[in-house]
Amino acid sequence: MSNYTTIPSTAASTTKRPEPFQVSIPEQQLSEFKTLLKLSKIPAPTYESLQDDGRYGVSRQWLVETKRYWEEFDWRKTEEYINSFPNYTAPVTLPGGGDEGGDEEYKIHFVALFSLKADAVPIAILHGWPGIFLEHLPLLTLIKEKYTPETLPYHLVVPSLPGYAFSSAPPLTRDFDQNDAARLMHQLMVDLGFEASGYLVQGGDIGSMVARRMSEFYEACRGFHLNFYLTPSITSPPPALANDPQIQPSALSATERAGLQRAELWKRTGSAYSLAHGTRPSTISLVLGASPLALLAWVGEKFLAWSDEAPATEEILRAVTLYWFTESMGRGVYPYRSPTLLSDTQSTKKPFGYSNFPKEICPTPVAWARTLGDMVFYKEHDKGGHFAALEQPQLFMEDLEAFVAAAWK
């Protein structure tokens, strides 16, 4: 693993250089969690909780069985898995972000595979909610199997967004939004030495919105790849195409129309969580931060409902347990308050790519997506859902590599 840890010589001075990081939750914290989980009550059955088709959310039976599994879950094995990759924390300054225009200091956690090649392409890969950096580790595994440090054509940087996992939380004294997250992610890439060469960014879910802002705000961000793209109304064309008959729903392919029908269903029956996150973030954070079972039901439902095939229970528990230990739910809910959450940022002439996975909650027709910029890559898949990098890491890697080949000139 150590050979992937050669940080580029162009990185910032020693005061800003990343420090190696190992995940190790204190034993007392682990013991307290196990006790709290054991004492957590399973609510009485209701008509809704006895339905097992997902239309009312997770079933009581799923919660009973998953709690039993969780009580035997070995978190230390997850730590070993995470620590098998090069982890770092880096001090990152947000200029003018503090009180009275002063600078703010953050610690940003990231996993990275650094190349020894002088012309390696820097790529930031951003997670969303309820994803976390864990969902991209299968991609890094495939990359390590395919390339040595000497042949790796990329510098792959997988950060934890502010408020998630081991990155600093947003400040307590001011509002914090997706633009701030984009500024921090850009500054991380600059501090790693990638301002002169430029870099690419990949994003899904919230990460896709942060990626779009990075491409819009910063010249050094030379292109972006998305596996999630929302138009303002979700199921209607972007404003730029509102009067174009060629891109109206009736002119779309059968696959695209089916995707819009699924998006409409999600909009009507599956999007209430985002309203809760956006309008009552304090309440939902306090509720989910007080009970591991509540967090499991809230987050676990999304993994079950948004995946093409239900992920292994082990995968769900890795993410939920990490959320619990790092209090990522409350610290990471801020993006949903952004007024631009479902609106387009300014279109850009920068190259971008879009991977369309069929069971994504809100797949966007390719003609609509083209309005976002200079589309140099598009791929429609026949399997995969919202957590594409976790569900289909091989396809995800192939798409990312094809996009880089088309975008990096």
Image (cartoon, rainbow, N blue to C red):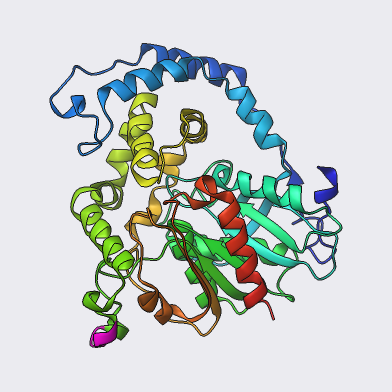
* Rendered position, 19 above or below 80: below
Q: Which residue appears at 47% of the width and 40% of the height?
A: 328
In the foreground, 99 or 289: 289
Counting the numbered discs, the total is 0
Residue 220 in sight in this render: no
Question: Residue 220: x and y, percent?
Answer: 64, 76
Q: Which residues are magenta?
A: 242-246
- The quarter of the displayed image where residue 362 is located: bottom left
- The quarter of the displayed image where residue 65 is located: top left
Helix, strand or loop for the magenta stretch, by majority: loop
Question: Residue 25: x and y, percent?
Answer: 61, 26
Left/right of residue 255 with respect to residue 138 in the rendered view: left
Q: Which residue appears at 54% of the width and 51% of the height?
A: 389
* Rendered position, 202 above or below 321: below
Which residue occupies the extreme left position in the image?
47
* Quadrant of the image containing the C terminus: bottom right
Left/right of residue 168 with respect to residue 386 in the rendered view: right
Q: Which residue appears at 66% of the width and 56% of the height?
A: 157
In the foreground, 195 or 359: 359
Question: Residue 201: x and y, percent?
Answer: 59, 66
* Rendered position, 204 above or below 250: above
Magenta stretch contains residue 2: no
Residue 42 in sight in this render: yes
* Quadrant of the image containing the N terminus: top right
Q: Which residue appears at 45% of the width and 37% of the height?
A: 311
Magenta stretch contains residue 245: yes
Question: Residue 96: x and y, percent?
Answer: 55, 67
